[in-house]
Amino acid sequence: MMRILCYGASNTWGFRPNSFNARTGLAERYDFSDRWTGILANEMVGCEIIEAGLNGRTTIFDDEVAKKPMRNGLAYLPLFLETHYPLDIVIFMLGTNDIKTQYKKSPDEIADGMRHLIQFVVKSNKGRNGLSPKILVISPQPIISAGLSKIYYDECSIEKSVILPKVFEKVCIETGCDFLDISKSVKSSKRDGVHLGLSEHRKLANIIKEKLLNIFINLPIECKVKAHE
């Protein structure tokens, strides 16, 4: 059984666009079968898709504004690797929260945050036979101005989101990781400018599925797409 950890933020968690409730501090969530992780789990035979999405998660930065705990991706990555090993692949889909105005981070600094995540996995023994898992970095889709909350993002954030694919790809080349740029194919919802609609979750799942099948060619474990009736 191929074990794949999907370590991401709200678009991995399944956040419904524009559903945040300021009174409760919670958002509505798509059903598992509608989330890209759930679609992969249903369609890929021989794969265990481990969903680890958290709203507000960054690469390496602490949330000092909302004071939400556990948002630093690097700080809690060891827990997920230890809990779910042995892992064949770790998928990182992070960066959208890093461009929030509160962090004041450049694209290069955000890319360095991704580099720290990659290096931690590479140095780990949480793959099979004491080796490290393979890594796939997904550069998230750009945010858009339509519906965007000016509390968290500004025009500079939008510009940074467009640059992230380039700097993430550079890090992946330098570290030898697999890279997937979804910026030209997957679009943020016009309802809030950040999150994915249902059709985009399906589109994202199909893109990731094709990438994973390509990665599997070089792995000794069989995994294939379920035949549609």
Image (tube, rainbow, N blue to C red):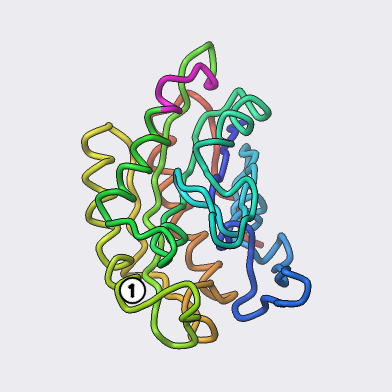
List x then y, in percent, for residue 5.
57, 39
Assign the N terminus to one quadrant of the image: top right
Please name the residue shown 56% across and 58% down the image. Answer: 56
Horizontally, is 168 left or right of 204 in the view? left
| Count of numbered badges drawn on the protein | 1
Amino acid, disc 1: Ile
Depth check: give the residue in front, 127 or 81: 81
Against 77, is 226 above or below?
below
Q: Position of residue 195 (x, y in %)?
A: 53, 72
User: What residue is at 58 percent from the left and 57 percent from the top?
Assistant: 12
Residue marked by disc 1: 158
Q: What secondary structure is marked by label 1?
A: helix
Which region shows up in magenta? Answer: 120-127
Q: Furthest residue to the top?
A: 129
User: On the picture, is 163 further left or further right than 183?
Assistant: left
Residue drawn at point x = 21 percent, y = 45 percent: 170
| Residue occupying the far right of the picture | 24
x 24%, y 51%: residue: 167
Quarter assignment of residue 20: bottom right
Q: Is residue 56 left or right of residue 179?
A: right
Above or below 181: residue 85: above
Magenta span: chief secondary structure: loop
Residue 27 appears at what percent x and percent y?
70, 71
Q: Nearer the viewer, residue 209 or 142?
A: 142
Viewer-proximal residue among 94 and 172: 94
Residue 116: image location, x then y, percent: 38, 35
Based on the picture, tell me whether residue 121 belongs to the magenta stretch.
yes
Quadrant of the snapshot with the C terminus: bottom right
Residue 160 on the magenta span = no
